[in-house]
Image (spheres, rainbow, N blue to C red):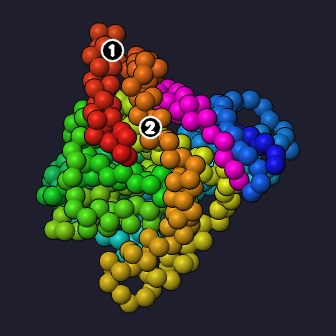
Amino acid sequence: MAHVTRHIGLSLGADICWPICFEEILKRLKLSVPMQGDTLTFDVSRVTIEPFDLKQPVRYDLVVDRLTHWYHTSREWIKKAVVLDDLYVFNNPWSIQANEKHTTYAAMMRLGLPIPETWMVPPKAYDKSADLEPTLQRYARLFDVGTIGQKLGYPLFMKPYDGGGWVGVTKIDNVEALKAAYEASGTKIMHLQAGVIPYDKFVRCIGLGPQTRVVNYNPSAPLHDRYTLDRNFVDAGERAALEGMTLTINAFFGWDFNSCEALLKNHQWYPIDFANACPDSQVTSLHYHFPWMVKANLSWAIFCAATKRKMRKNLDWEPFFAIAREDMPYAEKLKRYARIAHERFETERFEDFRRKHLAHLDEVAYEFFGTAEARDAVRKKVTALYPPHEIDQFTRLFMDRIADWRRNEGKAA
């Protein structure tokens, strides 16, 4: 029996708090996992940015990636490592690069998910290039953005076709506001999407591997209050449909870690924003829900590294499309999509692994999030975002909410 170390890498940007918590809890777990005749231990380190030989071996078994969506050097290192070295990474870098919100809307429409009616409009302005003027003169057609607004109805939402983090999203209540927003959109390519208003509930469902967490969401609140502390706000049927939808989206696009925003209206979930393959992971927004995210991240990373889970390099959409072609109610299709998702995420194997090897994670995380080290990690993130006179106030606020999590969920989660 050999003693083997599995190496986990963290590819980070401005992340501060969650990596500290990830590293500290992994250390405190003191894992020694029997696996196929070997005994596995685990270490974690942060991935550096430097020149690399394409043939240079990668020391990691798994990388948790937070940079691919915007920092290309790290993205290309990860892509080469997957192709040449069989690295497992979440999330799939090719899928992040190729599948923006526009593609995700179209794909989920094909699967029959109730996406609000959505139009793409050409940009209002262009950066000059040699071929642009003849192209537009020959092929661009004049249009009235107000006519599209009339077809969609008001209120509607204008948002970048590839955007994120609510940047550039505008609620539009009438044709005058629509024309003004389009005039101001510049060179951005925009979607116009029908509003699901009024709605009964606005939620975010976070998926990490087969794990999900449903959070009541208030988009109009300050950042630190958007993820609410509400509990028991969806019934079992609503939760099952939302989780099935989120896992379907994530498995379809090869995203192990993603979040889905959805609106409930007349007992129907409408997914409105679900290409979030680098979800918010900061304590300053997640607060009460932050320990769950850290634990879920650890559980999935350890499982994938321990089992040498293979990276799915090809997305293989046909099994989903085959179900979409069948004549059956949407609810039944969604259940069948979710079965594919559970197969791809190896849910049963993951749950068995967690029971056998990570049974003490709840207790270790519970203890850690009550320590001075946890408070110091939170304070470091607060210090990076808040003015000096608010650091004590918001450190206290976030630690109080984490204390609520420890009381309500910590040991039993």
Give the mark nearer the N terminus: 2 vs 1.
2
Is 249 included in the stretch rendered in magenta?
Answer: no
Q: At 86% across and 44% down in the image, what residue appears?
A: 55
For this rendering, which residue is in front, 116 or 33? 33
Q: Which residues are magenta?
A: 9-35
Residue bearing mark 1: 391
Residue bearing mark 2: 363
Could you tell me the amino acid type at mark 1? Ile
Q: Which one is in front in this view, the residue at disc 2 or the one at disc 1?
A: 2
Q: Position of residue 246 (x, y in %)?
A: 40, 61
Residue 67 in view, yes or no: yes
For numbered disc 2, what is the local secondary structure? helix
Could you tell me the amino acid type at mark 2? Glu
Q: At 36% across and 45% down in the image, what residue appears?
A: 412
Q: Position of residue 287 (x, y in %)?
A: 33, 33
Q: Indicate left or right for 270 with 299 as reference.
A: left
Q: Position of residue 307 (x, y in %)?
A: 67, 55
Q: Position of residue 345 (x, y in %)?
A: 54, 62
Q: Indicate left or right for 35 with 137 as reference.
A: right
For numbered disc 1, what is the local secondary structure? helix
For this rendering, which residue is in front, 231 or 268? 231
